[in-house]
Amino acid sequence: QVHLVESGGGLVQAGGSLRLSCAASGSILRINNAGWYRQAPGKQRELVAGITIGGITNYADFVKDRFTISRNVAENTVHLQMASLKPEDTAIYYCKAYVATFDGRWNDYWGRGTQVTVSS
């Protein structure tokens, strides 16, 4: 059993910053790729940023130069530093991780999400 818990969301004014965190716990042998996704009302879930176990990152065009993804492999945490936030960044942000558990299986796991609201 693996659990991902996001934190750090909230209400912020346009131009402000937030730092999201995702903590993974449970029968974790290893976390490979991890990432942040978001889903705004009426829209499909979309990738925001991803990071490999080696630290290689990729970003959606709409967050480049504003958001930074990072991870602590030893602590099984992934973070998303968000700056210069815009009202269109308002969404529920989800953490996803590709995890190997002690039984040797690999699966994708999702957190329940954290709400980010950016006011104009």
Image (tube, rainbow, N blue to C red):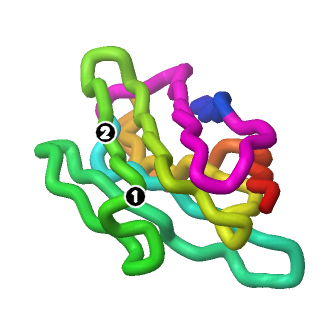
Identify the residue position indicated by label 1 in the image. Answer: 66
Q: Residue at x 60, y 34 (%)?
A: 4
Classed neighbour count for the residue bearing mark 2: other residues with Cα under 10 Å, few (<14), some (14–19), many (≥20) = many
Give residue 112's position: percent from left, percent from top: 75, 44
Task: Please give the label number shown on residue 52.
Answer: none
Q: Residue at x 72, y 82 (%)?
A: 44
Residue at the far top: name it. Answer: 75
Corner quadrant of residue 43? bottom right
Identify the residue position indicated by label 2 in the image. Answer: 70
Corner quadrant of residue 46? bottom right
Placement of the C terminus among the 4 image quadrants: bottom right
- Decide which of 41, 33 is in the foreground and name it: 41
Going by the image, does 68 lie left or right of 111? left
Q: What are the residue bounds of the magenta stretch? A: 9-30
Q: Is residue 44 above or below residue 10?
A: below
Q: Residue at x 69, y 72 (%)?
A: 88
Looking at numbered disc 2 in the image, what kind of residue is underneath it?
Ser
Going by the image, does 98 lie left or right of 39? left
Q: Secondary structure at mark 2?
A: strand
Going by the image, does 57 lie left or right of 26? left
Residue at the far right: name it. Answer: 42
Give residue 21's position: percent from left, percent from top: 53, 31
Placement of the N terminus among the 4 image quadrants: top right
